[in-house]
Image: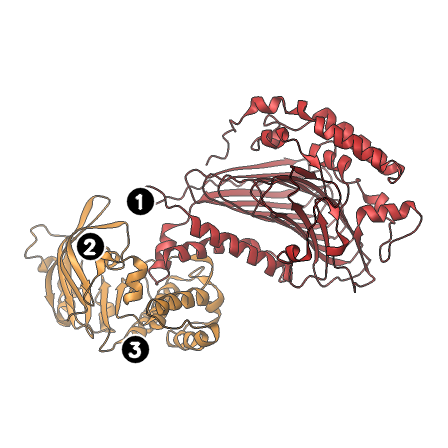
Chain colours: A orange, B red
């Protein structure tokens, strides 16, 4: 059974249809990259999978681990194992990073019938992951993302992923705005988590990230549909020629 | 949700309210007769002057600028009675749940009367005097002194700061007070543990009024923290009209906590008058969680060079609670700084008021005054009126003020939920984070722990009882910001 099965997915935001019949199957252990021009629906796909309520699904079906994902609330999807690394992580003044992440972890553990972790159990795990992401321990007690640089915010997303250990991690343009060092660190964090039980959906605009995280499959999303799929070589081709050449099914040329 | 719209309440009822002072007149007559022998002359004079003032003015209406957003009709038309001493028996068990861990001593007042059997004042340092104000004065009259409590200084301070001309509630209290706490912290003394003053309203079968009077004298270079705590036993209505005068001597460091956690039928008007000498550092923390109609006045006068004052507050209202925060910050001397930070959280039909007035007198050069009021409205029917007022008569000062009104941000809520935190908990976390800004401004102490726990409980209730808005439309932040430098 596939980990994620998306069939004929249509989704709208404020009455505008963004996804127009998207199909995608992702198996555990695979890394899929979704590429495409601005406005093609990449972030909408990520938001729908994370169950953001402002996006309305008008048609289609999404099964996650055999369960109907579209019936789930955001917190239930998270507890089932879906994780979204945000394109624009939100600042939450007044809630400490460590406290927040332990609350999240315990919410998930509770959902799965496991005992909650106290601070003493949690901290070593947290510190170890901080090291992996080359993050300063001082960030632990600072408020969630508050005053973080763009790179620190993105690393904090991957850190959360590394602690929460999802089955499906969706990276929404995690590479945008990152300098090369930060990009390397983020990629390292992701690669350390690749495993046969876990899948990644790497949404990106650029080939650059894929130099560090080699995908098994690359899909091109244009105007709410996947118009082409291939192996890692497809990303290189796109880098070379832009999205224009792959739009055989799409009459008008879209900006790269 | 506007910051300027006037209240359209029942003003006709208000206009006749001044005619309804008969119960107060009766109470005053009784009290004066009872105390003919007990009160010293100076005190009788204070009472009489204050009474005349109150009786001439009556209760303010919403035409009064200082009361524009708070309608007192319901208060004015309720015939409150004086509480007879000992008419309600309160047991130690009933009081136990109000205990504040880590406090050094506690004075308990039941319906305005000192309850020595419930109070705990043993093993105190001899640098701290704490007792019933009424008893201290009575002992002074008899030429003796209570153990550990000398009446000297009371006459010098009592009633010298509270402004009965400007504030009729202060006048009413000054006329009708029967008891309250007297505290004196000796020069240079450091009182480590907070002092707990517990004012209990306990149902007496009739609507009771009390006028607790507290005098705190912190001598030069002393350090102390005081918690003034208003609670109810039972759900009957009551009217507490408290006045506290806190005199901070040179370089004294004092924290004052006001905690309002009475029942939802309670009327509570409290006035904290702070007098700061040179270099004194005083912080006032007002935590309004309970009460039906609550007005908290904080009136610091920075009367010595280099004094610093923090006026910190949090108000959390739901149902039909009305929580009014009124501040008058007077800078009278140069080089003083004042900081006002108030956070409000309002749900259902609750209303909040933030009225922050800063007066910089002409000698108060190099004043640094700042005022910030931030509000979260959790329902379409909740309302906040926020009004800054600056009066500056000096020419070299820095004053800023700003206010914001917003809702819980959907982005933040989604972020928390996307990590597995269930919606009610996520909402609760965000509310607590907002309220915690107020806690962050308190020094680490048992008083802060106590207040933090009360806030946590209150917000858990709020998040649990929150009614989701009928429309699923995303909420947009409504913010109003202004900043002026004069």
Quadrant housing residue A116:
bottom left
Badge 1 crowding class, 10 Å Cα cut-off, few under 14, some 14 to 19, many 20 or more, is: few
Identify the subunit bearing mark 1: B
Residue at 43%, 52% in the rendered image = B464
Q: Chain of mark 2?
A: A
Instruction: Assign a secondary structure to mark 2.
Output: loop
Which residue of the protein is positioned furthest toward the right in this rendering?
A: B143
Say which residue label 3 marks: A192
Distance from Cα at disc 2 to Cα at disc 1: 23 Å
**x%, y% of residue A223?**
14, 53
At a point 22% along the width and 66% down the height, the residue shown is A201
Say few, some or many: other residues with alpha carbon within 10 Å of mark 2 (under 14 / 14 to 19 / 20 or more). many
Say few, some or many: other residues with alpha carbon within 10 Å of mark 3 (under 14 / 14 to 19 / 20 or more).
few
The residue at which mark 1 appears reads as B472
Determine whether, in the image, residue B324 is placed left or right of residue B333. Answer: left
Cα separation between marks 2 and 3: 28 Å
Residue beneath disc 2: A41
């Amino acid at each position: 059974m596939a980990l994620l099965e998306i069939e004929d997915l249509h989704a709208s935001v404020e009455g505008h249809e963004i996804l127009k019949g998207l199909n995608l199957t992702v198996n555990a252990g695979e890394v899929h990259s979704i590429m495409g021009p601005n406005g093609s629906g990449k972030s909408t796909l990520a938001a729908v999978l994370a169950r953001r309520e402002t996006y309305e699904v008008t048609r289609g079906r999404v099964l996650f681990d055999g369960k109907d994902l579209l019936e789930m609330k955001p917190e239930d999807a998270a507890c089932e194992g879906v994780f979204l690394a945000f394109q624009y992580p939100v600042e939450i003044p007044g809630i400490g990073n460590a406290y927040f992440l332990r609350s999240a972890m315990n919410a998930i553990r509770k959902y799965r019938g496991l005992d909650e972790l106290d601070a003493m159990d949690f901290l070593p795990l947290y510190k170890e992951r901080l090291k992996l992401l080359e993050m300063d321990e001082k960030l632990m007690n600072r408020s969630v993302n508050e005053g973080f640089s763009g790179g620190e915010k993105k690393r904090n997303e991957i850190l959360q992923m590394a602690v929460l250990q999802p089955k499906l991690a969706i990276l929404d343009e995690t590479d945008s705005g990152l300098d090369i060092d930060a990009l390397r660190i983020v990629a390292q964090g992701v690669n350390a988590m690749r495993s046969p039980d876990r899948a990644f959906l790497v949404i990106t605009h650029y080939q650059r990230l894929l130099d560090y995280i080699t995908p098994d499959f690359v899909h091109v999303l244009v105007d709410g549909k996947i118009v082409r799929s291939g192996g890692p070589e497809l990303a290189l081709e796109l880098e070379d020629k832009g999205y224009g050449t792959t739009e055989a099914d799409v009459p008008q040329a879209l900006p790269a | 949700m506007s910051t300027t719209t006037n209240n359209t309440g029942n003003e006709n009822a208000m206009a006749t309210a001044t005619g309804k002072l008969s119960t107060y007149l009766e109470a005053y007559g009784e009290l004066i007769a009872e105390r003919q022998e007990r009160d010293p002359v100076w005190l009788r004079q204070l009472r009489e002057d204050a009474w005349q003032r109150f009786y001439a003015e009556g209760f303010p209406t919403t035409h009064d600028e200082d009361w524009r957003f708070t309608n007192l009709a319901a208060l004015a038309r309720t015939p409150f009675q004086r509480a007879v001493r000992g008419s309600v028996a309160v047991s130690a068990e009933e009081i136990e749940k109000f205990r504040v861990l880590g406090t050094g001593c506690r004075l308990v007042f039941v319906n305005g009367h000192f309850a020595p059997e419930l109070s705990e004042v043993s093993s105190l340092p001899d640098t701290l005097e704490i007792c019933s104000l009424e008893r201290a004065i009575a002992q002074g009259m008899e030429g003796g002194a209570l153990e550990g409590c000398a009446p000297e200084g009371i006459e010098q301070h009592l009633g010298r700061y509270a402004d009965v001309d400007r504030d009729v509630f202060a006048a009413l209290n000054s006329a009708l007070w029967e008891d309250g706490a007297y505290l004196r912290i000796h020069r240079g003394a450091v009182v480590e543990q907070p002092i707990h003053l517990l004012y209990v309203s306990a149902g007496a079968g009739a609507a009771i009024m009390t006028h607790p009077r507290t005098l705190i004298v912190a001598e030069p270079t002393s350090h102390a923290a005081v918690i003034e705590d208003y609670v109810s036993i039972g759900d009957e209505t009551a009217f507490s009209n408290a006045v506290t005068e806190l005199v901070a001597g040179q370089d004294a460091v004092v924290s004052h906590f006001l905690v309002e956690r009475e029942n939802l039928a309670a009327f509570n008007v409290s006035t904290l008058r702070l007098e700061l000498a040179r270099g004194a550092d005083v912080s006032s923390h007002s935590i309004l969680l309970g009460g039906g109609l609550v007005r908290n006045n904080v009136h610091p006068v920075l009367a010595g060079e280099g004094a610093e004052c923090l006026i910190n507050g949090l108000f959390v209202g739901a149902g039909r609670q009305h929580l009014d925060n009124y501040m008058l910050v007077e800078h009278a001397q140069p080089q003083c700084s004042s900081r006002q930070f108030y956070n409000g959280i309002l749900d259902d039909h609750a209303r909040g008021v933030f009225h922050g007035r800063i007066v910089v007198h002409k000698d108060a050069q190099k004043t640094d005054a700042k005022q910030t009021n931030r509000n979260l409205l959790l329902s379409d029917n909740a309302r906040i009126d926020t009004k800054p007022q600056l009066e500056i008569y000096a020419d070299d000062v820095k004053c800023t003020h700003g206010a914001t009104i917003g809702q819980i941000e959907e982005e933040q809520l989604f972020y928390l939920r996307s990590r597995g935190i269930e919606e009610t908990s996520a909402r609760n976390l965000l509310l607590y984070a907002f309220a915690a800004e107020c806690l962050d401004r308190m020094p680490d102490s048992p008083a802060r722990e106590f207040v933090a726990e009360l806030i946590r409980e209150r917000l858990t209730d709020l998040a649990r009882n929150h009614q989701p808005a009928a429309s699923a439309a995303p909420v947009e932040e409504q913010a109003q910001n202004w900043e002026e430098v004069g």
